[in-house]
Amino acid sequence: MKLKELEGCLQQVDVFENPKLLLEQYPTRPHIAACMLYTIHNTFNDIEDKVVADLGCGCGVLSIGAAMLGAGLCLGLDVDEDALDIFKTNAEEFELTNIDMIQCDVCSMPPDCLSKSVDTVIMNPPFGTKHNKGMDMTFLSTALQMARNSVYSLHKTSTREHIKKKAADWKVKMEVIAELRYDLPASYKFHKKKSLPC
C-alpha cells in the first residue's frame, strides 16, 4: 500500500466526539499516523505478520493502519469505553478481522501481565504535560516491558532530552526516526486558538 493511499484510508476513521481532558484525548492525525506506520512497515519491517499492540489506542487510527499494512494481529488497549466503542465501529466499517481490543488502564497493568507478549508496540501516548505528569514515561515503560522487538512512540520535541535520559537509565536504545509537525486542533474549552502546531 502506498503512503497516500494509507493516509486516504485513515482520513475516514471516526475520532472522539467528546474528548476527555483528564485522559488527554487528542486524535492522531491521519497524515502523522500514515507517515509513522509507513516508516515502521517499510523501513523496519515491524508490522507485517507481527503481533502489534497500540497502547492508549483511542479510536484506533494506528491499529487500523497497522491492520491495513498486514499485521498478524493488532491489539488496542485503552481505559476509555467510549473510545473503544468508536474504535469497534471503525474496525467494522473497514471490515478488519485482525484487530482486537482490551479495556484496561495501561498505567496500572501488573509488570508481568503482558511481559514480552507482542512483537511491536505503537502509540501516541498522553503527553503528560497538562494533567497526569509523567504519564508518557509510564506508557513507555509499559511498552518496553510488552515488546519483544520494538516500540514506536510519538512525543513532544520538548521532552526529547528527558526521554533520552530515561532510555539510558532503562538501558534501551533510543532513536529519533522522524520529526513531524503535529497540528493540534482546538478540542477543549481552554484552547484559545483554532489550532496549534506542536
Image (tube, rainbow, N blue to C red):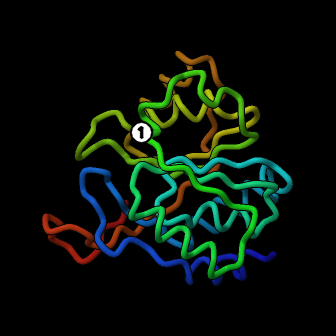
The reply to whether residue 156 is in sight is: no
Where is residue 9? Give x, y as percent.
65, 81
27 relative to 20 in the view: left or right:
right
- Residue closest to the eye, 128 or 102: 102
Question: In the image, is residue 36 above or below residue 150?
Answer: below
Label 1, on which residue?
136
Where is residue 72? Give x, y as percent.
82, 55
Please state, as top left, top right, bottom left or bottom right, where the C terminus lies in the image: bottom left
- Residue ID at (47%, 67%): 85
Please state, as top left, top right, bottom left or bottom right, where the N terminus lies in the image: bottom right
Q: Secondary structure at mark 1?
A: helix
How many numbered discs, if any? Answer: 1
- Residue closest to the eye, 101 or 4: 101
Q: Residues within 10 Å of mark 1 (few under 14, many from 20)?
A: many
**Quarter residue 11 falls in:** bottom right
The reply to whether residue 57 is in sight is: yes
**Quarter residue 152 falls in:** top right
Residue type at mark 1 is Asp
Where is residue 7? Give x, y as percent.
64, 77
Where is residue 178? Give x, y as percent.
60, 53
Question: In the image, is residue 136 above or below residue 11?
Answer: above
42 relative to 7 in the view: left or right:
right
- Residue ID at (24%, 77%): 194
- Residue ID at (32%, 42%): 128
- Residue ID at (54%, 47%): 55
